Amino acid sequence: MVKFKMYLDDETYEELKGEVAHYLVQCNMSYPLNIDNFAYKLGIEFIPYSELGKEAHIFAMHTSQDGFLCEKNRVYASVFFNDKKKIERQNMSKMHEIGHYVLDHNSTRNKPDEEKEAESKFFARYAMAPMPLIHLLPIVTVETIQKAFGLSHEAASYAFANYKGWLRCFNGKYKDYEQKILSLERNKLDIYISELKKNKERQSERYQPSEWKKRKLGLASKSRGQAVPLQDHNSTPVQGNLYEVRQMAGP
Ligand SMILES: [Zn+2]
């Protein structure tokens, strides 16, 4: 992975999201993603750097500190990854290399490397935490995104910023690829979502002003026994008052 920032055009971003949804549905994936399983279904083998011999290890570290893809005409594909990195980073690197594979970057020679990198990076980030699934969280923060999708703080911050942008444009209608993503299983993610819902309810209970505070603010609700009816059952006094008013106002 190369560190730089490059923006792709909107059309490309839409295409990439479509690719993510296509492969996730094809492999019948569920959330949060099990990347080893995803790679297995795509026919990709994962090889940790720690299993390499001394020479190969030096070569691997020289090629990338995180990971790289070895692929030959779709006959075989191996992703070598640095298993000394944090697990969240390892997962993102693996997904990044899967991106290079499914986007067939090895055979697209006329595309600049920068562009391939930006595409793979986006593919990985979107696949790990797609916007419509973030939208299911009852509380959306960097921390909840991090926990829900198993991301690093940095990746979750990126997802959070992207989510805010997505939400500004969201009109309540999901695009085709978003519906595909929403159709995926999400057993474990749903467990976390219901935990968050309970937390949210508990929090809102906690923030309800207590009775003595309400009284202080003059907001205390009258208990049922003391309820004052809007109009007395015996409506005579009201009619009497109306009569007096009419009297005062003259004929
Ligand atoms: Zn790359």
Image (cartoon, helix red, strand yellow):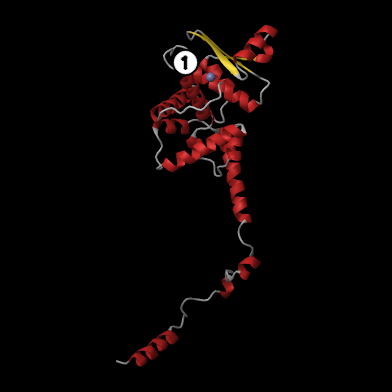
Quarter of the image with the C terminus is bottom left
In the displayed structure, would residue 73 be above or below residue 205? above
Q: Position of residue 86 (x, y in %)?
A: 66, 26
The residue lying at 47 percent from left, 20 percent from top is: 116
**Count of marks placed on residues:** 1
In the displayed structure, would residue 32 be above or below residue 74? below
- Give the residue at mark 1: 105
Q: Position of residue 138 (x, y in %)?
A: 54, 44
Quarter of the image with the N terminus is top right
**Element type at marker 1?**
loop
Residue 160 found in image quarter: top right
Q: Position of residue 211 (x, y in %)?
A: 64, 66
Taking depth in this image into account, of 68 and 33 the one nearest to the observer is 68
The residue lying at 58 percent from left, 73 percent from top is: 225
Taking depth in this image into account, of 120 and 216 the one nearest to the observer is 120
Residue 212 found in image quarter: bottom right
Q: Which amino acid does the dot numbered 1 rest on?
A: His
The residue lying at 57 percent from left, 35 percent from top is: 156
Taking depth in this image into account, of 132 and 184 the one nearest to the observer is 132
In the displayed structure, would residue 161 be above or below residue 39? below
Q: Is residue 128 left or right of residue 251?
A: right
| Farthest residue, direction left | 251
